[in-house]
Amino acid sequence: MSSRPRPRGSAIGSATSRRRHAGGVTLAAGVIAAIVALPLLALLAAWRTPAVEIWTHLWRTQLPGVVGGTVALLLGVGLGSIVLGTALAWLVAAYRFPGSAIFEWALVLPLALPAYVMGFVLLGVFEFSGPLQSFVRRTAGWRLPDIRGWFGVTLTMTLVFYPYVYVLARTAFQEQAAGLLDAARSLGRSGPRAFLAIAIPLARPAIVAGGALAMMEALADLGTVSLFGHRTLTETVYRTWAGMFDRIAATQLASLLLLGAFALLTLERATRGQRGFLNRPRGERRLAPLTLRGARAVAATSACLGVLAVAFVLPVVQLLIWAWRRGLDATHAETFTRLLAGTAWLAGAAAVVITCVGVALAYARRLDRSRLTHFTTEFAAMGYAVPGAVIAVGVLGPLTYLDRTVAAMLGAIGGPVDILLTGSVVGILFAYLVRFLAVALQGVDAALVRIPRSMDEAARSLGVAGRRLLGRVHLPLLRGGIAATLLLLWVETMKELPATLLLRPIGLKTLAIEIWERTSESMWEEAALPALALVLVGLVPLLIVTRLTRGSAT
Amino acid sequence: MRGYRWLTALVIAGVACAALVSPLVAADEVVVYSARHYGQEPAFEAFTKQTGIAVRVLTGDAGPLLERLKAEGDRSPADVLLTVDAGNLWNAARAGVLSPVTSTTLASNVPAHLRDPENKWFGLTMRARTIMYNPKKVTPAELSTYEALGDPKWKGRLCLRSSGYIYNQSLVATFIKRHGEPRTEDIVKGWVANQPTIISGDTKILEAIAAGQCDVGLTNSYYLARLLAKDPNFPVALFWANQPATGTHVNVSGAGVTTHARNRASAIRFLEYLSSVEAQQMFANTSMEFPVNPKAETHPIVRGWGAFRQDDINVASAGEFQAAATRLSDRVGYK
C-alpha cells in the first residue's frame, strides 16, 4: 500500500481512545478477513502432502505451455480491455458527437453478458460451420482461419470485460481530470496530446484497477477457455481433478492461481501510487466535452457503434433468434418465472452481504493503516482470481465442520441433528463472499479515497469518532459508491455458476444453472431464453450504476 | 459492546434462515444427486405416479457433486447418486459413498459388463462412442477401427474432443485395459500425428463434419440421433468401429444407492424401476440413448444404424485406467 503506518498518539485530544479503537478495528477486520480467507487457506493446506509425482508429470508434459497460455491470455485480455475501455471512455468523456449521450451508458451493457454466453454465441457465428464462414466459403470459396484458440477467447473476454475499465476510466476523466484538462485546453492543448500527457497519467489508477479486475476474471474462467480449447491453469486444475481423480493435486495447482491474483493486485497497488492528488474537491464541475464535427464525428460514432454491434447487439440478436425458434409454452413460462425470481433474490442477498463486509473491511483499512490489516484484507480478496468450483469445494470443508459441531451440540440437548448449513443458502452466500469480496473492496475503497482525510480529522476534533464517524460523516458521502458496488455485485453473482451449482439447496435453480444444463448438452435454442433473461435482469442495475458513476454534477 | 450483540443476532438469524431453507426430510421420497442433466426425465415422473414416492433431484457436475456427497458424509440427504460415465461411477464407488445392492431385478435387467462387479452401481442407459463421417467424402469401406484413424490418410481430416473430455478419457482407458499402455500410446500417437482439430462439443464435431471442416470424428451416438431427429437429411453418417473383432466402445450413465441413504428401500425400488422395460423405453425415446435392458426397444433412428457388436470389457475399467489414460494423452501431446 502506498501509505506508511501512521505515527501513533498524535496531539489531538482523543488519541488514546482512537488507538484503542484502532486495535479493535484491526482485530475485527482480522477475524472477518480470516473467515473469508478460510477456503483460500484450504488451498494452501493441500500442500501438506505435495503430489510430487503428478507435478513432475505435469511439468514434463504441459505445465510450461499451460503457464504460457495463461500469461498470454492475461496479457491479451488485460491489454485488450485497457485499450478498448480507455479509448471509448476518452471519446465519451471528452467529446460530443452524434449518439454520444446514448453511448455513454450503452457501452456498459456488454458486462451483463456472462463470458460463456458471449463465447458460445461468437463461436456459433464465427466458427467454420457457422453462418459467416459458410457464406464466405459458398460465395468466395475462401477458408477463413478457425476462431478457436487464443484469439477467440481473448476477443470474447475483451468484449465482455472492457466495461470494467470503461466505467472507471470514464469517471476518472470526467471528474478527476477536468480541471487540468480545461487548463490545457485554454493553453491550446487538446486532442491526443492532452489525452496522452494529462488524462492517461491522471486516470492510470482507475485504468489499471479495471484491467486487474478483467484479468482476474480471465484467470478464474473455465467455461469460456474450454469452449475455445485454450489451455490455462484453471483448465489444468479441472483436468487433474476430473481426469486423474486427484483433488489434492488439483488444489495444489489452484493455489498457483492465488499467486497470479497476488501479482495482479500488487501491480494494481504499485501503479496506484500516491493517490492523494486525485481527490477531487466536491462541487467542482465535470469536464466539458468538445463537439466533434464532420469526418471525426462520423469516425467516433462508428467506433462506438461497431463495438456495441459486436459486443451486445450481435449476441442479443442471436439469442433472440434461438429463443424464437424454440418458442414459448406454458410450462416453460412457469419454470421460467420461478428461475427469474430465484436468481434475483439470491443475487440480491449476496450483494447486500458482500457489500456490508466490503464496507467493514475497507473502513478498517482506512482507520488502521497497519501492514497487518492491509495484508489480511488483501488476502481475503484474492478469491476473485480463483475458479468458483475450487472455492465451492474449499467452502465445503469449513461448512460441514461447523454443521457437525452444531449438530453435535443440538443432539446433546435433544434437538434435531440434521445438517443445516451445507446445502443451504448460507453456504452459497459464503462462497459468493469469498469469490467476490474483491469487487466490493475495490468499489468501496475507490469511493472512500475520495473523502479527504482532513475531513476525518475535522470530524474528530468536533468529537465525532469511531462508529459515529462512519455513520454520520462517511456513509452519507459513500452512498453513491456503495449503491454502485451493490448493483455490480448483483450482476456478478447472478452470472455465477459453479459455486451456486454445488452448494445450492435441492430444488433451488438459477438462470445460470438452467443455461449450463442446456448448453452442456449443446441445446443452444433451449438455453437462449434464460440467457436473454439473465442479460435483461443484469441491464437494469447496470443502467443505474451508469447514472450513479456519472458523478455528482448535472 | 453493542456491536457484538448485533453480530451474534446476525449469526443466529443466519442459522435460523438456513434451518428454514433446508427442507425437512419427508417420509416418502428419494433424493437424487444427478450429473445427468438432459432436461426432463419422464421416467422419474412415472416412478412417482406409480409408487407415490417423490423424487427430488440436485443436478451438478460429476466431480463437485461427489465432493459434496463426501463432505456431507453420514448426514447427506442424498439417497441415489446418478452420474454419467463409468469412470465417474467407479471413482464414486472407490470414494466409499456407494453401497452394494443385491437385487435380482437389477441383476437380470442390467447386463453384467454394464454394472459394477461389486454391485455398487448399475448402468441405466448406454451410449456408443464411435466413428462419424461425411458420406460425401468418405466411403464406409475406408473406415474400420479407432486405431486406423491414426493412418496418415486421415491427416488434417480428423475432428476430436480434447483429451480432458471424460468420454475420450474412458475410451483411451479401455484401450489400455485391452492392449496395454505401449500399444495404446502408439494408437493415440497416430491420432495426434494426424493433427486433429480439437472441438469442444460432440454436437459441434458433427456440425463441423457436416460443414466439411473435417471428414471423420468420434462422438457419442445419441448426439447424432438428436440432430437427425431435427433434420432427417443431416449429412453425417455413423460407422460402427472395430466390428469384426473387439466391438464398439460403449459407456453408461448409471446410478448407485448411497452409503448413508435414509430411504434405502425406496432408493433400490427407484433403481429397479429405472431398469424396467417401461422406464428404459422412456430413456430410449427422450435422450435417444441405448436402453441397457435388452428387452426394451431403441428409438427408430437409433435402430436404423443396425445391430452392432459392443466391446464387452466391463465399463468399470474406464475408471481403473482413467488416470493412466490422462497421463498417456499428456505424454503424446494429445490436447
Image (cartoon, coloured by chain):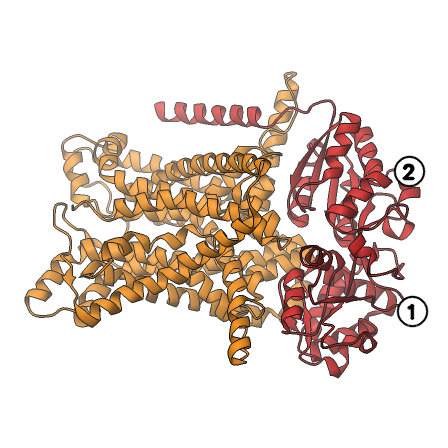
> Compared to A292, does A503 lie above or below?
above
Q: Which chain is orange in the rendering? A: A
In the drawing, does residue A394 fall left or right of residue B263? left
Report which quarter residue B177 is drawn in.
bottom right
The disc at residue B245 is 1
- Residue B71 visible somewhere in the drawing: no
Q: Which chain is red in the rendering? A: B
x 55%, y 34%: residue: A334
**In the foreground, A66 or B28:** B28
Q: Residues within 10 Å of mark 2 (few under 14, many from 20)?
A: some
The disc at residue B105 is 2
Q: Residue B105 location in percent, x, y?
A: 91, 38
Residue at the extreme left: A186
In the drawing, does residue A240 fall left or right of residue A137? right
Q: Chain of mark 2?
A: B
**In the foreground, B275 or A212:** B275
x 86%, y 60%: residue: B306
